Image (cartoon, grey):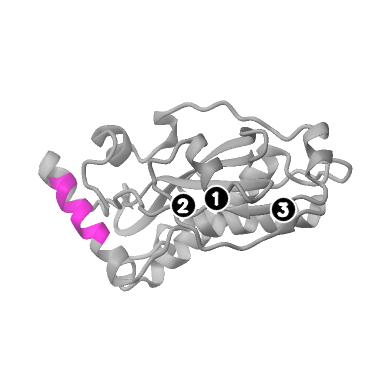
Amino acid sequence: MNIFKGTLVCGVLLLNTACSSIPTDSLTNEEAVALEGKALTYSQYDELPDFPAQTALNVQFGLLGVLSAIESGNTILENNQISDPALDIAKNLAKGIEENYDVNIIENDKVISVDAGLSDVVAAYNTYDYVVDVKTTGWGSIYYLEDWDNYKLSYGAHARLIDVKEKEVVVEVQCFTQPAYDDSNEGPSYEQLENGEGLKKEIARAVAFCVDHIVAQGQLQNHETNQPVDPLADNH
């Protein structure tokens, strides 16, 4: 992880994919037909963004507070061996595409640079027809403004379905979520973030939301039986 990777204010303080606006590109009927019988895999990146764990204390100290939050958050990830949520999102999306469009998922263990562009992704997975490419764009934890003892997770991801042979993106969707509980006491304490219990629970909620959001916005369900997907009711 790199403390100064990307723009500090946008990537660390806001933790919001709105920092870069990417238009949604949904699957067309023609593109859906082309999927049938094809080989599908998913990407995996070699680095995650920093994870600022913001508290009511460290936010009072400007840049020093940001650095402290990042150091604390990255330590939490390392101590609990937290893996990239983007890989879970990609695998769930691939499974759904397999079920809806009769593709063949082929697992792989190839890891690519977080700085890889479209041409690099295509080159890395050139033995497949399609690749589900999901990258974590930002994440971190922040206390409830009305309850400094409990926390919520911010998480953002950028998802693409790439036609490897044509070297083009056929589906592209961004996801940002900061699920909050109506009763903030249901949110994890800082101790539960530190021991991994609360953090893993909140990451699972974010993954579930992003999978549903990407499927709905990217129209990745069978076009004949496509049903809207309801996001988490408590997402804010």
Residue highlighted by disc 1: 234
SS for callout 2: loop
Q: Position of residue 213 (x, y in %)?
A: 62, 44
What residue is at 62 percent from the left and 40 percent from the top? 162
- Magenta stretch: helix, strand or loop mostly: helix
Asked if residue 200 is positioned above or below residue 69 in the image, the reply reads below
In the picture, the disc for residue 39 is 3
Q: Which residues are magenta?
A: 65-74
Could you give the CA–CA distance between mark 1 and mark 3, rounded to whole angstroms? Answer: 37 Å
Q: Amino acid at mark 2?
A: Ala
What residue is at 27 percent from the left and 53 percent from the top? 1
In the picture, the disc for residue 90 is none
Residue highlighted by disc 2: 180
SS for callout 3: strand
SS for callout 1: loop
- Tell me whether circle 1 and circle 3 mark residues in contact (CB < 8 Å): no
Q: Is residue 105 visible?
A: yes
Q: Would you say residue 214 sits in the magenta stretch?
A: no
What residue is at 41 percent from the left and 57 percent from the top? 184
Asked if residue 143 is positioned above or below residue 201 in the image, the reply reads above
Local crowd size for mark 2, using a 10 Å CA cut-off: few (<14), some (14–19), many (≥20): many
Q: Earlier in the sequence, mark 1 or mark 2?
A: 2
Q: Amino acid at mark 3?
A: Ala
Foreground disc of the pair 3, 2:
3
Local crowd size for mark 1, using a 10 Å CA cut-off: few (<14), some (14–19), many (≥20): few
Residue 99 appears left or right of 16:
right
Q: Position of residue 156 (x, y in %)?
A: 45, 44
Q: Amino acid at mark 1?
A: Asp
> In which quadrant of the rendered view does residue 19 lie?
top left
